[in-house]
Image (spheres, grey):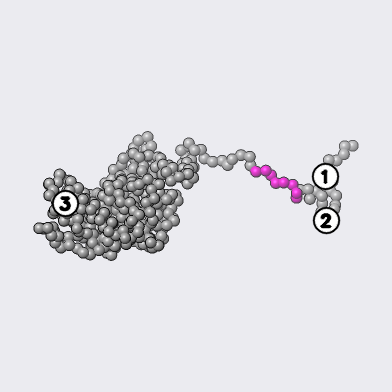
Amino acid sequence: MAASRGWRLIRHGRCWLSQAEFSGAPGPPDSLYPPIVASATAKSKAAKRRRLEHFHQRVHEAASIEEKLRLYGLLQRPKYMVYPQTFAINADRWYQSFTKTPDLDLDELRSLACDALLQESFYQNKKRPFLYRDQDHTPGPFLTQLISSLAALLCGRNPLLAASSLDLNPEVNYYWHHGEEVVVHGHRKGRVDPVRFQIDDHPHLQIRVPKQLPEVVPLESDLGDVPVIDHKPSKLPLFKKQYENKVFIGSKVADPCCYGHTQFHLIPDKLKRQRFLEANLEDQIEVAYRANGIASLFAWTAAQAMYQGFWNEADVTRPFVSQAVVTDGKYFALFCYQLNTLALTVETIQNNPRKNICWGTDSEPLYDVVEDGDVKGFNDEILLQLVQFLLNRPKEL
């Protein structure tokens, strides 16, 4: 008779040997197969989500800021061209919506100056300017001489200005996503894409510094309401172009002066105050100044944040502050911008209570008229406020 192959149950104290053997047995080995994931090339939502997660991971793991910027602008699609200087009606509200920026009045900010005014307006014998070139004739040289002279004079009182970089006619670029739209033309018709925007700005002057300006309000401050505009940006009107997606503050990433201090913008002849008055659009005069301030400062501060490694999937951990002066050579408006968030995409904006904040003043004349070698009606308050603007610096300096 064959011997039984069953387990022998020998009692040892209170423990059965069979039980001891089972309790010491190793657990089942880990799975030998990778987890099942969606195809990277399929047209399903899961596949699209996987491709997006893979892209986010590549940007997060980029070895350098240059590589991160290259990956961020890698995919080229038609995007709306946002012009800081625009004739569009009520453009400031649209720009507030695109950049998630409420507009707050700041009467304390005013500014500007005057020795250079006589030099450019009276002492020099200048010929008549070409059509639409009046800004290059007198206001541009006046602003350049004024700001460079003031900055040099104030270096002793503000060490930050002594270490700054003054750029003449620089280029500033920023590319971002905000909202969604359905593609209506082409081989991608019917697909849902993020709404893409690009700002290509050309301030007359800008001052870059090696240290950040101090925050105006805490990062999580909730000030003002952002306009909600449900229309397509093409109704503003904005137009689409497809070309390089660019993020640039006016210098390369390795430049030590990687933070913005103050920009100076010249209103072009096509947006002159007299044109609005002749068209019975007096209410749009300040709109042009505000739109210029909001769009230009958003592009500049957001690009600065991206130079520090932040982007829409890795939001800023500290605010970025910059200032701007917008002028036509006679009327000046001042703006201060605090960037609190880059998370403006559909996925990141939902649970993001932060808002970017812009304070600004209405435009005021620096002087009334220049006659017989004399500046009449000069506004001392504007000059003193501009000096105060340039003296802004971090608290530790």
Question: Label 1's element?
Answer: loop
Q: Residues within 10 Å of mark 3 (few under 14, many from 20)?
A: some
State which tag comes first along the sequence, 3 or 1.
1
- In this rendering, the label closer to the viewer, 2 or 3: 3
Q: CA distance from mark 2 to mark 1?
A: 18 Å
Q: CA distance from mark 2 to mark 3?
A: 102 Å
The amino acid sitting under disc 2 is Arg
Q: Is residue 10 magenta?
A: no
State which tag comes first along the sequence, 2 or 1.
1
From where the camera sits, is residue 52 visible?
Answer: no
Question: Label 2's element?
Answer: loop
Q: Which residue is mark 1?
A: 7
- On the rendered image, what quadrant is the N terminus found in? top right
Q: Position of residue 278 (x, y in %)?
A: 14, 53
> What are the residue bounds of the magenta stretch?
23-30
The amino acid sitting under disc 3 is Arg
Q: Which residue is mark 3?
A: 275
The disc label shown at residue 14, or none: 2
Q: Is residue 34 left or right of residue 338?
A: right
Q: Position of residue 356 (x, y in %)?
A: 36, 56
Q: Would you say the residues marked 2 and 3 are in contact, meaning their CB atoms lie under 8 Å apart?
A: no
Tell me the residue at 22%/59% (across/down). 113
Q: Position of residue 157 (x, y in %)?
A: 32, 62
Tell me the residue at 23%/57% (across/down). 332
Which of the pair 219/1 is nearer the observer?
Answer: 219
Tell me the residue at 47%/44% (across/down). 63
The amino acid sitting under disc 1 is Trp
